[in-house]
Amino acid sequence: MDSGFRVIALAALGALVASGPAFAGPPAEQGTSFYALVVANNASLDRSRAPLQYADDDGAAYFELLEPQVDEALLLAVLDDDTQRRHPGLAARARPPTRRELLAAVDHLATRMEVDRKAGRKSVLYFVYAGHGQRNAVGEGSITLLDGLFGRTDLFDQVVSRLPATFIHLIVDACDSYLFVHARGALSPGPSYAAAITSSLSRMELQRWPQLGLVLSTTREQESHEWSAIRSGVFSHQVRSALSGAADVNGDGRVEYSELAAFVAAANQGVEEARGKVDLLARPPALDHGVALADIRRPTRQGYLFLPPGMTGRFWVEDEHGVREAELNKQRDRPAVLALAPGRRYYLRGEGREAPFQVPRAGAVVDAGGLGWGDLPLAARGPVEDAFRSRLFSVPFGPSFYRGYVASVGEEPVSIREQLDLTP
Amino acid sequence: MNVSGWATALAAALALWAVEGTARAECEGRVVIVPFDYLASEAKAAREAEQFVRDAAARRLGACVEAREATVKRLQRLGAFLSSCPDDACRAGRASALEAAAVVEGIALGVGGRPSVALSLWGRDGKGVRASVSLAGGAAEMDALFEKWARRERGAGPWPLVTLGAAAGAVAAGAFFGARVRQGQQAVSDGTACGGMSGQALSGCLDARFAEGRRDAVAANVLFGAGAALAAGGTIWLVWEWR
């Protein structure tokens, strides 16, 4: 073998080694477009009910969670001063939550979905609402926009029927699901908004729209609560945590409806007071009960925090502006991954300690097992809030809780593998 | 010793350290790679990632890496031993139970459409290194992790401290020459440098003392400079080894 040939052969070998082996990649979902329409409104149309404080924060947080995962995200919200400070740059992208803007957004998305459909692509929409809910003049469950109510009939006639989406994930956090600390804005006697809307969603209607999946707060208490510690509704905080990946009980990278429901149930398991409990209705689209609400395997513009086996207990992630991004109570043997927006400083916090970290770029994985921990300064908090804080997320979420939950509600469970592959 | 002498000594120290490091990287105990788990991925990807890591470990650690079959048999004998370790003490116990000088655990990740592996390597004391490594980026990242591990295992060694010692020596020598310059300058100023001489003899003596003073001043400056450079290099080296 002459030396020239050897050089070429070595170069080729080097290139082969440098390129690495071909690994099994994630399942291709190239043929699907994702969209998000987030509507949030602090205002109340009823003079007897005070405006909410954190519905706009929830809208901003939902938008920032979904925006890196979808092809286009739209935000209809008026962000207050504090929310604009905590979510820099977002106000410029938001439109007011009025009927006209909502219908224009639906028109825009319908046009894009029609293009997708003609191109043979599927389309998935997240339609999120955070704000007051009430019943309109005919007793129909409605969400509150700046300029009026938007009722159940509007939802089906003006939104669902006009969007040629393959799946629509409808997430509604109306007033009933806002919990604690600032109790205000009692609804008039009668079924709560969420109960009204769920009872109004007749079996026939849901069968008519088999592409529609629901995640609705159905808290029995007829008051509006917000938790100032997280500047959010508790329901929305828990749902966002689940969608970040914390609810992925079987580690397949997908969060299905039953996993989200069990995660929220576990997060509230320790809350004994009835008025503090969050209840939800999570119903997957009739078309496919196994459709994922979130899939962290998909290529997105997010980074990831990996919590390895061995880490155990309650953890939450806050960003540099104090926005609590995700929270979970982790079982020791179960690894977990949380999807986060890149380019920001974060703090992973647990009981009495914190570890700063940064997600440098989209796709980056930060290993929480390698972070440096320091003591967490104790902020002064009221006793009521302390009690509540200690009860939320007090129960570890894992396969055993999930199995018990799905058995109790009669849902079909996701498959969970038990052991490492120990074949030689 | 002049400046080139110091540079030669430093190069020799570096070479000795590298040779010693290579020698210590020879097999000193069993490396056990626990079959990989997976998250947001699948069993096939976990096996591929494990093989990728095994290949990298074999490149860096040679015959020390135990075959998967042997590790599986060992784990099956140990039964319920596979629960996760929360701290160094538990990890040290696991290394001991596996009769391993080093244990490697990994979880294949498939988040964001990019296959990666979260790796944890630790030794008999339970201390080690962790990293999440992209599998699409080739072997360099993995080799760097094993190198980091090997560096941590063999410790910093004496050479960073030797370099800092050399820096101190250079500064001391510079101070000595500086003092001599100062002493000579004082003697010339006091008129005691060439006591009793006059005329041509005095002129020649003073020229000689000035030339000697210039040499000493240059030596002092060079030694101070070299000392500062060695001190900076030694400190960076020490921090690099300890990180």
Image (spheres, coloured by chain):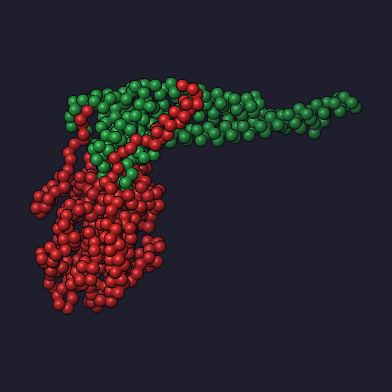
Chain colours: A red, B green
Residue located 23% across and 71% down the image? A158
Q: List x then y, in percent, for residue B202.
A: 86, 27
Residue at image coords 19%, 61%:
A212
Asked which quadrant contains residue B243, the reply is top left
Residue B97 appears left or right of B236:
left
Residue A278 seen in this snapshot: no
The percent coordinates of residue A259 (x first, y second) are 19, 51
Seen from this angle, which residue lies furthest right? B199
Above-or-below relation of A26 to A228: above
Horizontal side, residue A345 vs residue A49: left or right: right
Q: Residue at x 43, y 32 (%)?
A: A12
A48 and A143: which is toward the camera: A143
Would residue B102 be visible to someone looking at this image?
Answer: yes
B145 or B207: nearer the eye?
A: B145
Total marks shown come to 0
Q: Residue at x 30, y 31 (%)?
A: B51
Quadrant of the image containing the N terminus of chain B: top right
Whether B181 is drawn above or below A97: the answer is above
Q: Position of residue A167 (x, y in %)?
A: 22, 59
